[in-house]
Image (cartoon, helix red, strand yellow):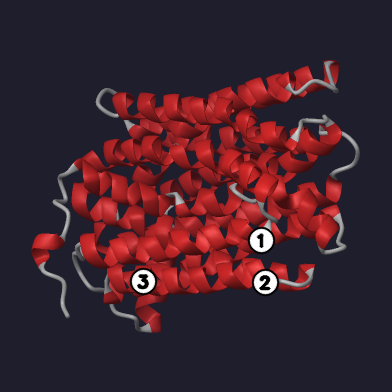
Amino acid sequence: MPVSKRQYLNPESRWMLVLLATLVSLGPLSVDMYLPAMPAMRDTLGSTTGDIQLTLSAYLAGFAVFHLACGPLADRFGRKPVLQGGMAIFVLACIGCSLAENVEQLILLRFLQGIGACVGPTLARAVTRDLFGPRRAAKALSLIAMLMALAPAIAPGFGSLMMLVWPWRSIFVFLAVYGVTMSVLIHTLLPETVPHRQSLHPVTIGRNFLTLLRAPLFMSVALGSSLVYAALLCYLSASGFVYIEMLGVPLEYFGFIFLTSVFGYFVGSATSARLSAHYESNQVVLLGALLSAFSCLVMLGGSSLWPTSIYPLMLPMMLFAVAMGLVLPHAMNLALQPYAHMAGTASALLGFIQMGVSAIASGSVGSLMDQSPAPMVWLMTALSLTALAIIYRASRRLASN
C-alpha cells in the first residue's frame, strides 16, 4: 500500500535532520562498534592482527566501490529505492558476519556490508543538498554532523559492554536490527527528493564522472578531505590493539577513550555551523586542515616522549576531531555546490575517493604495526600534512578567482 505523503517528515523540521543523521551514522556505527572486539575476533577465528585489520579495509573497499553505482542509480531512480536496496544488503551482510566461521568469510561479508552501508551517508548528503540548496547545505551538514557525533560517542563503549556479556557476534546482530529499523523509517518518513532524473546511459554517467574528475576544485577538496578522513581511519583501525594490548587499557574502559574525540568532533561541528554564516566554506576547510596537521604533529612529539601513556594519543585526537568537524561538512558543501543536477553522482564520487583512500591507509597501518603506536602516528602525520598542502593550494586558487 502506498505511504501517504502526510506521513513524511516536513523537510524543514529538525526531525528531518535527525533522520538524515541516523542515516549518516550507519558508517561510523559499522566501524566503531566492533573496534573493541577485534582482538577477540582474532583469537576466536585463529587469525592474525593484520588479517583482522583487513576486515576494516574490506568494509571500506566495499563502501568505496559501490559509490560509483550508488550515485548514478539514485540520480536516475530516486533516493528512496536505492536506500532501501542498500539497507537490505547491509542487513543480510550483518547476519552473515554474525555467523562467519573464519576470517576469510568475515572479510568477504564485511566487503558486502560496506556496499550496503555506503547508501546511508552518500544519499543522506544528496538529500541534504536536494532539500537545503547550495547556501544552506553547509549549515545543515554541520548540524547533521553534530547529531551524528552521538554514534561514535556511544558505539565503542556500547560494543565494549556487549563484549562483557555476549560474544563479538552480537555486535553484528545489533547492526542488523539497526538496518531493519532504518529501512522502516526510510519507507515511512523520508520523501523522495531527487530534483531531476538523470539518464543511466553509460555515456551520460561517464560524462558526469569525467566532468567531476576534470574539476580542479572538486578534486582538490575531495582528495584533501579524504586524506584527513584516512588519518582518522588509521587511528580507528589500530586503536583496539594500541590501547588494549600495547597500553593495557581494560576492555570496559576502551569506549571512554573515544568520548574525548567525540566531544572534539561535536565542538568542531558546532563551530562549523556557526562559521558558515560568516566565512566561506573554503576558509573553514583550510582552518580545519591546519588544525589537523598541528594535532598530528603534537601527537607525534608527545608519543615519542611518553610512549607508554595514553594521553599523548588521546588528547591530540580530541583536537584532531575538532578539525574533522570543520573540514568534512564544508568540504562536502564545496564539492556538491556546483552540481545540483547530479548531486547523487558528485556525492558518490566524493565518497568513493574518501573511502578508497581510507581503505588503502587502514590496510597499510595494519602491515606496518609492530609493538608500538609509532607507525600509526607517523602515517597519520604524513596524511594530514599532505592534506594541508592540497587544501592550501585549492584555497589560494579560489582566492585568486
Q: Secondary structure at mark 1?
A: helix
Write down the residue under mark 1: 169
Label 1 close to label 2 by CB (< 8 Å): yes
Q: Secondary structure at mark 2?
A: helix
Using the image, determine if residue 173 lies above or below residue 151: below
Which tag, 1 or 3, sits closer to the chain's start?
Answer: 3
| Of the pair 110 and 197, the residue shown nearer to us | 110
Q: Amino acid at mark 2?
A: Leu
Comparing marks 1 and 3, which lies closer to the viewer?
1
Looking at this rendering, what residue extends furthest in the bottom direction? 201
Is residue 315 left or right of 379 when viewed as pictured?
Answer: left
Write down the residue under mark 3: 84
Residue at (79, 42) in percent of width and height: 241
Q: Amino acid at mark 3?
A: Gln
Q: Is residue 387 visible?
A: yes
Which tag, 1 or 2, sits closer to the chain's start?
Answer: 2
| Of the pair 370 and 245, the residue shown nearer to us | 245
Residue at (69, 35) in percent of width and height: 252
Is residue 281 left or right of 190 when viewed as pictured?
Answer: right
- Which mark, by number, is residue 99? 2
Comparing marks 3 and 2, which lies closer to the viewer?
2
Q: CA distance from mark 3 to mark 2?
A: 23 Å
Is residue 4 left or right of 138 when viewed as pictured?
Answer: left
Residue at (49, 69) in percent of width and height: 91
- Assign the C terminus to one quadrant of the image: top left
Looking at this rendering, what residue extends furthest in the front direction? 165
